[in-house]
């Protein structure tokens, strides 16, 4: 089975542990923390406690420890497998245009016949998450499930970090391959947003910049539908993301507005919006976001039953909308999963999870993504 233990570091108290680790032979430690807290001393202390483990983590927009959400702490979750092998791969990205190739490089490093799952953590600002997911999925194919997320930096959006063993740096993408036939994985991603208005054709875009829908100014259309909320763009865009359906696919990807350009009448989103895709506006409220987290937990199929460990990756946009109610969505996941699975995770700048219909990994925004692990 999968065994888990968890410790936390805070600037005021330091580490909360006093005894020697019970999982000193853990093969992997997931490390999630505030950008300024991921120092060599903190990471070194984790490595000293778990000398045989791969250290794997990133900076966040909030750390999840069981059902509590923290800011600017470090949560270290040691994981021991009885039958599963762990392998770490890393690559550096200097330009967003290298993101697709970065995904290919990681997939090639991890390739093996018994590869069952790939966990991915990426720089959240420099890397194009859409193209990273495409590079990973196109190279791995249907051999393994790919999940993960993009590192965060609170609501600052200045600098993000990835942890790979004792290396801590920006511009890096790290992935852990999990190998072995006895590993069971459950995964799902849900948002909690409802589409409204007609579906429109993306007639002009470039990467993550959207200029026209149905030949009309995308910004003007957004302002028309948002009404009084339009004056608060781009911040009000957290309540009104865009559902994007790619050509030939049934399911939609949610994209969040990052900025607007009045001169070019364009909107920039946290992920690519290709020409030829179809798009609809979305809206939400607090209760629907919590319902989305519940649905994600329920959708982890039979692997939820008997799962030993759950990794939660939720979008920073959800946290900014939920505010003091943020923990309600984590508590909703716990209510579905039950008391057994240990839970950790983080609030991200993008979530990586497969579509239910195709099994291909995609970048999501504004979603709660859950990965459950167990051995049998």
Image (cartoon, rainbow, N blue to C red):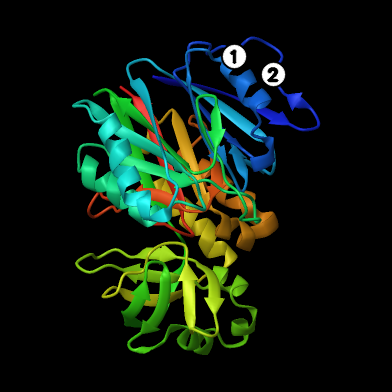
Quarter holding the N terminus?
top left
Quarter of the figure with residue 104: top left
The answer to the question of whether label 1 and label 2 lie on touching residues, with beta carbons closer than 8 A, is: yes
Judge whether residue 348 can be spotted in this image.
yes
Residue occupied by mark 1: 49
> Residue 17 got which mark?
2
Determine the CA span between mark 1 and mark 2: 11 Å
Residue found at x 33% / y 82%: 200
Residue found at x 23% / y 64%: 249
Would you place residue 101 above or below residue 182 in this image?
Answer: below
349 left or right of 101 in image: right
Residue found at x 36% / y 50%: 98
Judge whether residue 116 can be spotted in this image.
no
Quarter holding the C terminus?
top left
Would you place residue 276 above or below residue 371 in this image?
Answer: below
> Residue 21 got which mark?
none
Give the class, few, some or many, for how many residues have Cα within 10 Å of label 1's Cα (few <14, many ≥20): some
- Name, please, the residue furthest toward the right: 12
Would you place residue 302 above or below residue 132 in this image?
Answer: above
The answer to which of marks 1 and 2 sits earlier in the sequence is 2
């Amino acid at each position: 089975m999968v065994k888990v233990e968890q410790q936390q570091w805070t600037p005021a108290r330091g580490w909360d542990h006093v005894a020697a680790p019970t999982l000193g032979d853990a093969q992997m430690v997931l490390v999630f923390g505030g950008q300024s807290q991921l120092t060599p001393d903190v990471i070194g202390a984790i490595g000293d406690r778990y000398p045989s483990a791969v250290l794997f983590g990133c900076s966040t927009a909030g750390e999840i420890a069981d059902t509590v959400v923290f800011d600017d702490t470090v949560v270290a979750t040691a994981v021991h497998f009885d039958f599963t092998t762990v392998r770490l791969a890393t690559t550096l990205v200097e330009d967003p245009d290298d993101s697709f190739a970065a995904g290919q490089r990681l997939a090639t490093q991890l390739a093996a016949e018994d590869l069952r799952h790939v966990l991915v953590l990426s720089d959240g600002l420099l890397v194009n998450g859409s193209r990273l997911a495409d590079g990973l999925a196109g190279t791995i194919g249907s051999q393994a499930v790919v999940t993960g997320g993009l590192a965060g930096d609170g609501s600052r959006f200045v600098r993000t970090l990835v942890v790979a063993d004792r290396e801590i740096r920006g511009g890096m993408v790290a992935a852990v391959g999990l190998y072995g036939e006895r590993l069971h994985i459950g995964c799902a991603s849900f948002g909690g947003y409802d589409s409204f208005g007609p579906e429109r054709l993306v007639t002009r875009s470039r990467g993550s910049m959207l200029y026209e829908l149905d030949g009309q100014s995308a910004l003007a259309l957004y302002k028309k539908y948002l009404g009084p909320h339009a004056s608060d763009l781009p911040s009000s865009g957290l309540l009104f993301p865009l559902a994007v359906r790619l050509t030939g696919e049934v399911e939609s990807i949610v994209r969040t507005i990052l900025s607007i350009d009045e001169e070019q009448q364009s909107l920039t989103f946290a992920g690519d919006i290709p020409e030829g895709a179809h798009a609809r506006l979305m809206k939400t409220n607090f209760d629907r976001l919590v319902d989305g987290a519940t649905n994600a937990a329920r959708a982890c199929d039979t692997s939820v039953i008997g799962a030993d460990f759950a990794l939660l990756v939720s979008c920073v946009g959800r946290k900014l909308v939920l505010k003091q109610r943020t923990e309600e969505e984590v508590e909703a996941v716990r209510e579905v999963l039950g008391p057994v699975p240990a839970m950790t995770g983080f609030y991200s700048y993008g979530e990586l999870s497969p579509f239910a219909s195709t099994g291909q990994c995609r970048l999501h925004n504004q979603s709660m993504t859950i990965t459950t692990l167990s051995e049998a």
